[in-house]
Image (cartoon, coloured by chain):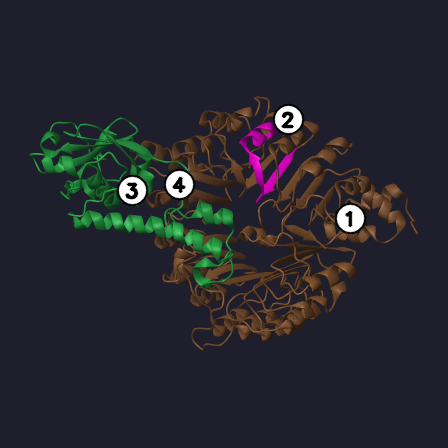
Chain colours: A green, B brown
Amino acid sequence: MGKEGLGLEITELRLGLPGADSDSSHRCNVMIDKNEKKRAFSEISEDDVEEGNRKKTTIKNQVVGWPPVCSYWKKNSFSDKDGSVKASKMYVKVCMDGAPFLRKIDLGMHEGYPHLAKALEKLFGEALRNAESCEFVPIYEDKDGDWMLVGDVPWEMFMESCKRLRIMKRADAKGFGVLTSKEALY
Amino acid sequence: MNYFPDEVVEHVFDFITSHKDRNSVSLVCKSWYKIERYSRQRVFIGNCYSITPQRLIARFPGLKSLTLKGKPHFADFNLVPHDWGGFVDPWIKALAKSRIGLEELRLKRMVVSDDSLELLSKSFPNFKSLVLVSCEGFTTDGVAAIAANCRFLRELDLQENEVEDHRGHWLSCFPESCTSLVSLNFACLKGEINLASLERLVARSPNLKSLRLNRVVPLDTLQKLLMRAPQLVDLGIGSYVDDPSSEVFSKLKAVIQLCNSIRSLSGFLEVAPCCMSAIYPICENLTFLNLSYAPGLQGNDLTKLVQHCRKLQRLWILDCIGDKGLGVVASTCKELQELRVFPSDPFDAGNAAVTEEGLVLISAGCPKLNSLLYFCHQMTNAALITVAKNCTNFIRFRLCILDPVKADPVTNQPLDEGFGAIVRSNKSLKRLSLSGLLTDQVFLYIGMYAKKLEMLSIAFAGDSNKGMLYVLNGCKKLRKLEIRDCPFGDVALLEDMGKYETMRSLWMSSCEVTLGACKILAKKMSSLNVEIINESEQLEFSLDDRLLVDKMYLYRTLVGHRKDKPEYVLLL
């Protein structure tokens, strides 16, 4: 969960799309990139294979119409596994104390808090590296306008209620009025 | 022949409602045919290309309710190319021109356009009920037309359709004067709706019994809707996510306790498992529970829920419930008649969620089981034989092993004996789907024992033409046969051509049937349409009769070739 503060994997802060990083000096992120790219490519190439070989190549994954589940059900019953696009994108703004401009992130693209943490690291690594204090706290503004600590509620509930994200310096957190999920009810 | 005046005979016919019986009645004599046709209100047409709308209208001037089916079943699995056919437009146009007072239209696997829906909504002042299942081609604009123009609408039921959502205001198109709704199902629509309109609509629909919401309807709206409609019998929940300690959630818990008429529950298109406990009070009375669209629920959640559902008769669930969870179902749901277990991960055989064990437990615990759809990773002959001993009431038995040619993992044998046992002991079996490693032997058993079988689905099975012949010769009541990727060819196809006149349709794809054989069949049987679907580059249809046909779909018809076929279909 991300509430311990972000790790300090450093990535260049670029204007490109998230994941377009080609900096090879930081293995961890590059590996993530590679995996994500690989996933994207493998999705594309799987499609190509299916188009080209409509007959049976291997039965398990690539036969048209097998297993016999209705295409409607297939599209609508699986969340993230087959990489299908969610019906509504959930872009929220992300700001970070000290960073010159905001970013936007699609919550629907992430499967949970760890994923989100990695994505935020990639977006803001530069600023994180340059900051004097090393600790940051991710918080979010919920539907009621309250600022909440990221990580308390189940992921799905978070996705539903998060309107925007902020990466705040831990030193500033005290006295800011960040509520835990329970406090927000009163 | 008639001892009674026509009016008396007609009155007697009023009590005969099943399509089959009315069809039989009409064949008795000319007089009965005439009386029957004038008094018939409901007509079912299983293949829209078997007859024309004009002939329908001519024969049944009193028609009020029409059911039409379009594409073949395998269209569900993307085996039928886009725009193959099944257009409802000519039907609606013809009916609109006539004097038919249509009140109800039910369509399955048809192509429906917004124009058709608009014409429908404006042409029949007493129109009451529209049910669209697995249809496509329309947008929410068409739905809006229905809402706006059908003043006495009782039922708008959209099931699993591909609808282009214009994020409309379709729901707001129900006029304030519309208070007649009994059933509203828009779960398959993806887009936003006006929640306030929905609340007002429900508030002014005192007869509303069935409401199925789409995923954009949040939990707090659900709570408000249930306040307005505690009389609901069938509920489909859209989004079911909230903080269990919130006030809204407490209100929901309270109002659910008041909804003691709910017998059928589905949806949970988005779900937070921690909220499920609010549902438990209504589980007691549920007879139908459909969680097949709720991948957010894990096995434990499902099991906990099911434990409260003692009166369940039909359960549709994902395989993450696991064999153990099915064991809980078996010990809790003693009234269970129908079980459908869907694969939560159809392409990953690594995570074996349910196996033959779950099925055996169910068969042992649920004596009333008569309908099964079971996706699993493996099956054994021993298990099927046990199931056959425990359950002799199956009407529908559909088993789908995700690896379609998988043998019995214990004995490495084909599953012939297992399925053989099923057909032997279930004499009322009407529908059967096979999978797993299968030889001609299983078809021998089917031909011998499945005497009431009406629909058979076969994939990757059999060794030779004998397999198909056993079925064609033995299953006297067969109406629909669909085959893919089996080594059945011309000899089987042509052995008994008259048989196909007794059936609705035959589908064969990736088998060993040649173009020449199809031509022979088409030439001999003028009452059949033999369609060849060739999507590859051979659009010129080389006239080589030895060409293996990719997909063949044949069906009996009274009206010859259809005029709306796409280019890639060859009608012989």
Is disc 2 surrounded by few (<14), some (14 to 19) or many (20+) residues within 10 Å? many
Q: Are marks 4 and 3 in contact (CB under 8 Å)?
A: no
Span colored in magenta? B128-146
Q: In which quadrant of the rendered image does the C terminus of chain B lie? A: bottom right
* Residue underneath mark 4: A86
Q: Horizontally, is B46 left or right of B204 in the view?
A: right
Q: Secondary structure at mark 3?
A: helix
* Residue underneath mark 1: B559
Is residue B97 positioned above or below B415 on the image?
A: above
How far apart are labels 4 and 3 at the CA level?
A: 16 Å
Q: Chain of mark 3?
A: A
Q: Are marks 1 and 2 in contact (CB under 8 Å)?
A: no
Question: Which amino acid type is marked by label 2?
Answer: Arg
- Which circle's residue, 1 or 2, is located before the other in the chain? 2
Q: Chain of mark 2?
A: B
Q: Which quadrant of the view contains residue B551?
A: bottom right
Specify the label residue B151 is tagged with: 2
Question: Which amino acid type is marked by label 3?
Answer: Trp
Question: Which amino acid type is marked by label 4?
Answer: Lys
How far apart are labels 3 and 1 at the CA level?
A: 58 Å
Which-is-in-front pick, marks 3 and 2?
3
Question: Image point 50% across, 37% down: which residue?
Answer: B189
* Residue underneath mark 3: A155
